[in-house]
C-alpha cells in the first residue's frame, strides 16, 4: 500500500476507535444508516465488482455476498482503518484489495467496476476528481451510489459528541455538496441520476441517497 500524498489531511490521524464510537453514538446514528444504505444498493444492483471510496473500517461490508460480488476494492487515506478492514473482511471475498491512497492519486483499471460507492465522501474531496475517476473505472451502465449530508437546521456539520475535540480538525475541510450541483457535474462525465431521496435520521440530520448510472462519455 502506498502512503497518501497529502500527509496534512486530518483523516490520517483520526483513530479508528474514535471514528467508530462517534458514528455509533446515539446523537449521530450514522453507522447503522450507512450500513443499511450499502446493503440496499448491494441487494438491488448485485454487482460483480465494487469499489468503496473512503471505506474507513468497512461499515456495511458484512452485507457483501461473495457468491455475487467477486471483487471488492476498499480505498482510504487512513492506514489504521484499512488494517482493521483487512482483518475483518479480507477472507470473505476472494478478490479483496485494500488501497491506502488519497483519491487524487488513485488509479483502478478502466471499466473494471460495476459499482462505485461514495458515502459521506464527496464532502472531503474535489467532486470533479472523483467523478472523472469513477466514470473511467465503471463499466458502461455501471452505477455510482452516493450519500450526501445536507444542511440541517440546528445541526452542526460534525455532530457534537464526547469525541468532538478529536474530530474538530475535520471541520475546516468538510464542505457540504449541493445535490443538484453534483448531478450537473456528474452529467458532464456521462452520468445520469436514476434515483434520489432525502433521508432524515432520528437525530434530525438529513441526507440525500442517490444513484447515478454511467451512460457513456466518461
Image (cartoon, grey):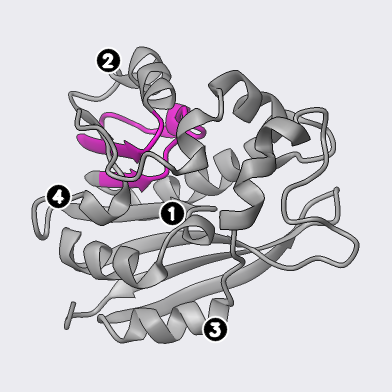
**Where does label 3 land, which residue?**
180
Task: Look at discs 1 and 2 and give the one toward the viewer.
Answer: 1
Give the spatial CA distance, label 4 vs label 2. 21 Å
Residue 60 is one of the magenta-drawn residues: yes
User: Is there any visible trace of residue 141 in the rendered image?
Assistant: yes
Q: In the drawing, does residue 131 fall left or right of residue 165?
A: left
Residue depicted at x 41% and y 46%:
42
Q: Is residue 183 above or below residue 205?
A: below
State how far apart marks 4 and 3 are (Cα). Answer: 27 Å
Mark 4 secondary-structure assignment? loop
* Residue drawn at 66 percent across, 51 percent down: 171
Q: What secondary structure is marked by label 3?
A: helix
Check disc 1: other Cα within 10 Å, few if <14, some if 14-19, many if 20+.
Answer: many
Q: What is the CA distance from the residue labelled 1 to the residue labelled 2? A: 23 Å
Q: Earlier in the sequence, mark 4 or mark 3?
A: 4
Quadrant placement of the C terminus? bottom left
Above or below, comparing residue 151 to residue 190 in the picture: above
Q: Which residue is denoted by mark 2 in the rendering? A: 91
Label 3, residues with CA under 10 Å away: few <14, some 14-19, many ≥20 = few
**Dot label at residue 108:** 4
Specify the label residue 165 is tagged with: none
Local crowd size for mark 2, using a 10 Å CA cut-off: few (<14), some (14–19), many (≥20): few
- On the image, the x and y values in percent for residue 193 come to 43, 78
* First-in-chain label (2 vs 3): 2
Query: Quick one: label 4, few (<14), some, or many (20+) residues within 10 Å?
Result: some
**Mark number, residue 118:** 1
Outermost residue toward the right in this view: 154
Amino acid at each position: 500500500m502506498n502512503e497518501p500524498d497529502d500527509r496534512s489531511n486530518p483523516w490520517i490521524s483520526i483513530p479508528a476507535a474514535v471514528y467508530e464510537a462517534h458514528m455509533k453514538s446515539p446523537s449521530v446514528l450514522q453507522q447503522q444508516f450507512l450500513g443499511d444504505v450499502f446493503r440496499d444498493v448491494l441487494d438491488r444492483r448485485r454487482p460483480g465488482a465494487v469499489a468503496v471510496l473512503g471505506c474507513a473500517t468497512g461499515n456495511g461490508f458484512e452485507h457483501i455476498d461473495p457468491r455475487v460480488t467477486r471483487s471488492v476494492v476498499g480505498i482510504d487515506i487512513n492506514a489504521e482503518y484499512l488494517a482493521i478492514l483487512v482483518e475483518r473482511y479480507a477472507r470473505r471475498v476472494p478478490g479483496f484489495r485494500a488501497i491506502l491512497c488519497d483519491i487524487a492519486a488513485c488509479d483502478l483499471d478502466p471499466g473494471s467496476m460495476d459499482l462505485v460507492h461514495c458515502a459521506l465522501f464527496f464532502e472531503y474531496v474535489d467532486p470533479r476528481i472523483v467523478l472523472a475517476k469513477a466514470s473511467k473505472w465503471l463499466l458502461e451502465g455501471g452505477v455510482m451510489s452516493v450519500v450526501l449530508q445536507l444542511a440541517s437546521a440546528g445541526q452542526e456539520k460534525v455532530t457534537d459528541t464526547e469525541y468532538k475535540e478529536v474530530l474538530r480538525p475535520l471541520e475546516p475541510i468538510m464542505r457540504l455538496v449541493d445535490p443538484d450541483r453534483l448531478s450537473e457535474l456528474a452529467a458532464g462525465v456521462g452520468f445520469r441520476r436514476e434515483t434520489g431521496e432525502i433521508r432524515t435520521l432520528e437525530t434530525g440530520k438529513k441526507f440525500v441517497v442517490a444513484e447515478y448510472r454511467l451512460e457513456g462519455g466518461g
